[in-house]
Image (cartoon, rainbow, N blue to C red):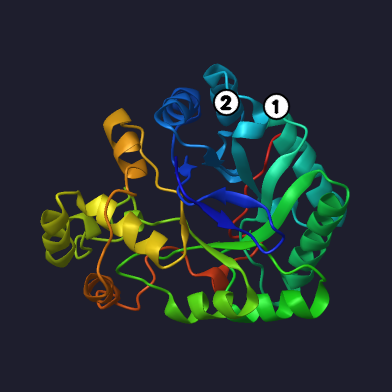
Amino acid sequence: MTTTITLNNGVTLPSVGYGVFQTPPDETATAVATALEAGYRMIDTAAAYGNESGVGEGLRRSGLARDDVFLETKAWITDYGYDETLHAFDKAAAKLGVDQIDLFILHQPLNGEEEPYALEAYRALETLYADGKVRAIGVSNFLPHHLDRLLDERDIVPAVNQIEVHPYFRNSELLAKHADLGIVSQAWSPLGGITFYPGWGDDSRRSTLDDPTIGAIAQAHGVTAAQVMLRWHIQQGRQVIPKSVTPARIAQNLDVFGFSLTDEELAQIDALDTGVRGGPEPTDNTRENRYREIPEA
């Protein structure tokens, strides 16, 4: 069994979940069923991934009770606005085949004159939470100033902020902000996948999986580089959602509770931080440049 993290409203979720970013819709059900069979009990998806239905099908194939699996999904920015986000929940729940979503979050912040759309979207999340349709609410890719603005206008502190954080981009300022506010830091790129995802970056990018410091720590513990990175997150209090469609790696990513990193090893990994974001810049988001129509269920 995985250990758990307790959110600021008392809801618990596994420290290690399974992510389906970039998993093709027709492969998602099999991947999710494989992950659940391996022992995962938390699945993260999003409307923008186009594979929520596959997640729901994977859950049904697993034979597990609904209450045994923690489901998280995200509303996309083209569905922001109070009524629009309430409907985004309806679409997501129908695709997942569930009545209640465990964690429903806003996928991206909006900026400038579009910021009110995000604030109204979060107000919709608060309504869904009050109505018992979701067990917890949160955000993703919000920077410190986005959080400040949100908390100036809204009542509920997000339970999580799902962000880019990995050894090459520790995102320390934002992690400290989360600690101050009681927000769980959820790493959407816990293995530094953004450093080697197809279509991202250029030939100058280095894969965290090939980093010599991480490799040496892995060798010392008889584990893989991926397991070292996941353990680094967990020991520093973050929740992680690694992705893979390879059954052996799916199981391996969950097997991170049989060893511990020393304080020195944690510091060595912290020191790999380049301060350079690998993924999209959250301050660049507009409804036009990130437009994506989210279909009905």
Circle 1 Cα neighbour tier, 10 Å, few/some/many (<14 / 14–19 / ≥20): some
Looking at the image, can residue 296 be seen?
Answer: no
Left or right of 160? Residue 240 is: left
Decide which of 193, 296 is in the foreground and name it. Answer: 193
Mark seen at residue 59? 2
Circle 2 Cα neighbour tier, 10 Å, few/some/many (<14 / 14–19 / ≥20): many
**Kind of element beneath mark 2:** helix
- Seen in the picture, residue 218 relative to 102 is either above or below; the reply is below
Q: Position of residue 172 (x, y in %)?
A: 43, 78
Q: Position of residue 72 (x, y in %)?
A: 61, 45
Q: Earlier in the sequence, mark 2 or mark 1?
A: 2
Q: Position of residue 191 (x, y in %)?
A: 33, 55
Decide which of 242, 275 is in the foreground and name it. Answer: 242
Hey, which quadrant is residue 251 in on the image? top left
Left or right of 14? Residue 199 is: left
Inter-mark Cα distance, 2 to 1: 9 Å
- Seen in the picture, residue 198 relative to 99 is either above or below; the reply is below
Amino acid bearing label 1: Gly
Decide which of 288, 243 is in the foreground and name it. Answer: 243
**Kind of element beneath mark 1:** loop
Label 1, on which residue? 97
Mark seen at residue 267? none
Amino acid bearing label 2: Leu
Query: Residue drawn at (67%, 60%), measured in percent from left and top?
Result: 138
Hey, which quadrant is residue 8 in on the image? bottom right
Assess whether mark 1 and mark 2 are in contact (beta carbons under 8 angstroms).
yes
